[in-house]
Amino acid sequence: MRFRHHVRHEWRLLRADRLLTATLGLFAVLFLYALLNGSAWVRFQEDTLGALAEARDERDARTRAELRRIASGGQPSSPFRDPRAPNVLGSQRNSRPAALPPGPLATLAIGQSDLLPFYYDVSIYTNDQTFLQNGEVENPLHLLVGRFDLAFVLVYLLPLLVLALSYNVLSGERERGTLPMTLAQPVSARSTLGVKLVFRVIVVLFLALGVSVVGGLATGVRDVGRLALWSTIVTSYAIFWLGLATWVNSRGRSSAWNATVLVGAWLLLVVVFPAAVNVAAGLLHPLPSRVEMITVQREASNEAVNRRSELLARYLEDHPEMSGAVVSEASSSAALAWAATEEVNRRLGEVVERYQGRLEEQRRLIGTYRYASPALLAHDALLETAGTGDGRFSRFEAQVRGFAQELKDFFVPAILAGDRMTEAVVADIPSFRYREAGFQTVVGRIVPALAALLAMTLLVSVPGWRAMRDVRGTS
Amino acid sequence: MILRTARKELTDTVRDGRFRWAALLVGALLLVALGAGWMHVQEARAQHETARATAREHWDSQGEKNPHSAAHYGIYAFKPRLPLSFVDQGVDPYTGTSVWLEAHRQNDFVLRAAQDASAVQRFASITAAGVLQQLIPLLIILLSFGALAFEREQGTLRQILALGVPRKHLAWGKALGTAGALALLLVPAAALGAAAVVGAGGGASGATLGRAAILTLAYFGYFSVWVALSLAVSAKASSARTALVVLLAVWSVNGLVAPRVAVDLSKSLYPTPSAFEFAHTVEREMANGVDDIRPPDREAITARLLEEHGVERVDDLPVNPSGITLQESEEFGNRIYDRNYEALWDAFERQSRVHDALAVLAPGLAVRALSMGLAGTDVEQHRHFASAAEDYRRDLMRAMNMDLALNSRAGETYLADDELWESQPPFDYEAPSLAWVLGNRRLSALVLLFWVVGAAAAAAFGVRRMEVG
């Protein structure tokens, strides 16, 4: 009864404050705008993937028609593009698309999806170089600035809303002279304050989670588990800021002092620390340059071309499983070319492995830096939950590599044996389907960040909460 | 009196622990960012030089080959870094650094550094330019939001004015005091930056120094805007707290919201095709031609050549029709690529113009454009390099095809040797002149000037109409 009474009272106070209601209204607009932006981007990706699938079907239909025509006595349209040759049917001309569907909560966070490729054309010639390609066509300036999505509003701007609502939760009462009167009632300072804080949490979360969940569901999000995870992260992050405000309020200083300190804290945690982390990361863990990869690849391919027949012999030695396939005379040029290709890939793979090892190490170290700021923690966790962070993209890349290997396993024995492909084969060519990480995997990836965020929240809330015991009506 | 006020303001500031901490933090970030940027650029330049030399060596030493095979082999071009890019790396991490120049195709730039970096780094990728554009204005706000509002709250404003100090002098004194405090931070940083520019790789060229001077001027103008704006708000706000809130709101819109809104707005005004659509269009037009651009027909070319040279048989032709056909198909491809790439680049530039125009609402957009432009890291200068590389590719392909056409005959096996490869001029890229950059960024310069004048006028107006107590 008393709780409801309090809440109703707080609600009236809030409604009476023009500045605050205007701020809430502004935030509602920002949230909606961010959501629309995110869903437009998801639609764009879906349209692209649709066009991609359509193009593949057309290509397949053309290939089948040509194979049918040749089977009934026709000539291939070009001797270099005879689809009966397995090195042609498996080539880039007849590539199989490997597509990463937009992340389960991609409408809520655009994340890395505007920068990293979300589809590849895969063939037997797919190698490490394939993964150096660019993502979507985008103005580099836009990639630099980043997008206005819900994750941005939640991480950067939501704290400001929390602070605007709570910087004077205690000091305001004292300054207006209402605190002694409140405390004269048979209620403890803590419970009064507790109600005020809970009320503020409800207002903020109603807005933030309401838009996330309702907006997400309305724009086609179906993964309820991830939505719950997203809500948990947002809630912890909002409570962190509220806890910070409580602590600052418990110092018993003026509202102006509170405001200055809290805004300073926001700047440090959201802007300055992440920037410092980035500068430090660039200095201490510079990412290795890829320029030398190009040089190595060139050298490898020059050499490989010159040593084709030697390479084929060695290839067959290295791959006893292939030696059952007799290398026929007719196929020898294709087999030689394939051996050279494999050699280039092997050399390139060595360089890339070294490079990738260093890159992973640097990224892992930089990853630990996110514990420097709750904003970085929350942002990273939100992206991973949404499926637009680095984790899902590297998972995709790994699966594409696996798929390229499947294609090779399918075509290479035929290349070495000099087999001819028929229309019936087309249906058997492997195709790609992204296997989403299980919910446990996602949770596992986020737990450390979430735990750290909760620890930070406790760290700032507990001292404040304890200090509230000694609150007096006057300073 | 102006100087006396300034001195008092400066002393106050320097004694204030909050300023000292803030300045220390921002100063350290600025220096580290400058240092890291400088090291990064030096390293990238060295790598670029090595890679360029190796790429050329590969080209020169390909051995005996048909010129068209050499054209397919091609050569890699690497984007050079201008000396000032250590201050502002601009869009460089997002444009890619290398392009393969080969027969028949205009390739995209690959190797974008940002694709290797993680989301953590992208969240707050900051360079010296970021510190200058975001954090220094913040410091200015913290220094001066209370300049007049605090004096009013404490009642000292009435006293000072009662002494007969002209308001204008008081305001100038406050502004100079803030400027002095900032100078303590920025002058050493600028001196170090200048030393780095002059000391790097055997002295700086006149062009670099010119760019650096204007860059300094642009940032000076930008900081003046913030000092004047802070004073104006401090003069008019009902309390120091309100002044702070208003200024921070302006700061967030300037640095956080406006740039992102500009992205969405410019994308919706000038949409670009998807990568798939773009590739598909090029592929289709390459296969079938478009409008009056038609793919060359080998037989028609041979017939034309026979007529031109007045001979009956292909064997009697003094040129190899294959070389001529290859060159014509190269030119056909060039027209298709020009159509599509020009449209794309033009769309990017129109999008950039939207950002530039929105600077009327957020001065940060204007100084960002100027800063990237002068550092040589904006989208326009990337396009400048990309077109130069493409022109070089076309010259190289023409040389290969014409060698084939003039030095061989139809049907014979023709191999050229190192002499031909070595006779090709190297790709020497010359960055655009300062005048080109300024012409390109004139809108931003104009908008920044508008802000300087507008903010100064607002400060003058605010101070003249300021309530005393």
Image (cartoon, coloured by chain):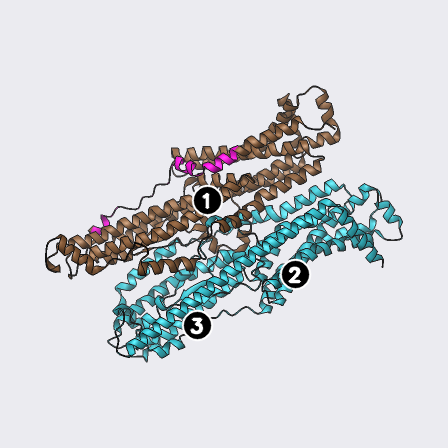
Chain colours: A cyan, B brown
Crowd tier of the residue under label 1, counting other residues whose Cα lies within 10 Å: few below 14, some 14–19, many 20 or above? some
Q: Secondary structure at mark 2?
A: helix
Q: Which residues are magenta?
A: B420-449
Residue A398 within the magenta-colored segment of the rendering: no
Q: Secondary structure at mark 1?
A: helix
- Tell me which secondary structure the magenta stretch mostly adopts: helix
The furthest residue to the front: B291
| x then y, percent, for residue B317 | 12, 56
| x then y, percent, for residue B199 | 42, 36
Q: Could you confirm whether marks 2 and 3 are on the same chain?
A: yes
Q: Quadrant of the N terminus of chain B?
A: top right
Q: CA distance from mark 1 to mark 2?
A: 42 Å
Q: Nearer the viewer, mark 1 or mark 3?
A: 3
* Left or right: B385, with A272 as reference point: left
Which residue was labeled with disc 3?
A431
Residue A231 image label: 2
Three-letter amino acid code at disc 2? Ser
Three-letter amino acid code at disc 3? Ser
Q: Secondary structure at mark 3?
A: loop
| x then y, percent, for residue B352 | 47, 45
